[in-house]
Amino acid sequence: MWNIIGQERAVSLLKHGLESNRLSHAYLFIGPPHVGKMTLALSLAQALNCETEDRPCLECDSCRKIAAGSHSDVQVIGLDYNEDEDAERKQIRNVQIDGILHDASLPPFEGKNKVFIIDGAELMSAGAANRLLKTLEEPEANVTFILLATDENRLMQTIVSRCQRIELQPMSIAEETQALTEKSGIEPEQARLLAGLSHGCPGWAINAASDPRIMEQRGSELDQIIGVIRGNYEERFAYVFRLAAGFTQNRQAVYDTLDRWQDWWRDMLLVKLDCDNMITNIDRKEELANMSKNYNLSSIRNFIQSIDAAGLQLKQNVNQRLALEVLMLDIPREEAKVSPI
Ligand SMILES: [Zn+2]
């Protein structure tokens, strides 16, 4: 039984490869954060090493050890966060890849197949990618590499061409809500809220269901956003200053914050269009309804486009503070406050 929420297409491809004994020696799983890339990779590692007919059974010693991260033939490598270094310069280093390539040259120790999972493969240094490429060109028997990446464009094309590429798509909100209720035992209303907030990536929802700090942080982020919308220019620029200062250390956190802005304004649009059942922030319906009265449809629509544009500019490495300041200037004025001239 493949222990993953959604991703039926990817699972059926891998199942078919397993049953017909035609699995690739290298896979590239592409998809947004928390969509299920690591879960699927670990499931494949279990299927490759399971001791029963019903691969992966999730119950034999091998399946259990892989789930616990203690199987000697299954290794996960990624960024080493222990070093005190600028996050932007962080890379998967040559020495990490050398380590797994050396291990890959040895026969399996306790299982049937060696599996190496490279999390954030787009963060390999050029040297590391070139070392891996040589091994991908001359694959060993009983060795599988699984590369996980969010941004395919940052991977060397030669690496991509050596892998079987499998794309993992976010689930629909309805599917995710149902899966979270049935498989993870989350209450339906909470499941619907988490499914919306996770944008179809169940890993985020499952983390948020078990770690209350995640929803607390989302709540305080939303409160800040609402404060900024109601605030004056000084408050808005102070907010941007804080946001931009964190960008170098953690880009993803700033992208996530922009997603929250996007969700809030999209929700206001939906509330205005009487499509309340489609909103993301279902626990803030009343606040949304009150705020949306202050804006007309076209100003909400225009501002959603401004948020899109700011997100794109950040990804294109435009001066991030400037891009965010322009966004603050674009926040529409409340209708009641528009001067009557
Ligand atoms: Zn098993």
Image (cartoon, rainbow, N blue to C red):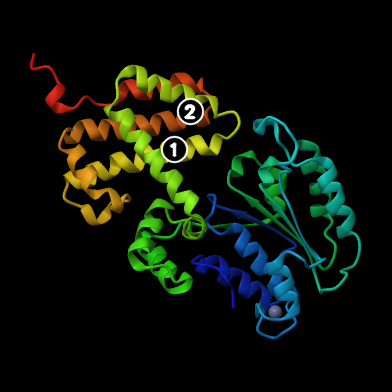
**Residue 23 visible here:** no
Q: Which of the 4 image quadrants contains residue 117? A: bottom right
Find out if the beta carbon at label 2 lies less than 8 Å from the nearest ligand 1 atom: no
Mark 2 crowd level (few <14, some 14–19, many ≥20, 10 Å Cα) = some
Looking at the rendered structure, the secondary structure element under dot 2 is helix
Looking at the rendered structure, the secondary structure element under dot 1 is helix
Residue positioned 12% across, 17% down in the render: 339
| Residue in the foreground of this view, choosing between 30 and 257 | 257
- Image mark for residue 306: none
Quadrant of the frame with the C terminus: top left
Ligand 1 location (quadrant) = bottom right
Residue at the extreme left? 340
Q: Amino acid at mark 1?
A: Thr
Answer whether labels 2 and 1 touch (C-beta < 8 Å). Answer: yes
State the count of labels. Answer: 2
Tag 2 residue: 243
Q: Which of the 4 image quadrants contains residue 79? A: top right
Q: CA distance from mark 2 to mark 1?
A: 9 Å
Residue 172 in the image: state x and y as whole percent. Answer: 39, 60
**Residue 150 visible here:** yes
Quadrant of the frame with the N terminus: bottom right
Residue positioned 40% across, 19% down in the render: 237
Q: Which of the 4 image quadrants contains residue 93? A: top right
Residue 267 vertical placement versus 10 (above, below): above
Tag 1 residue: 257
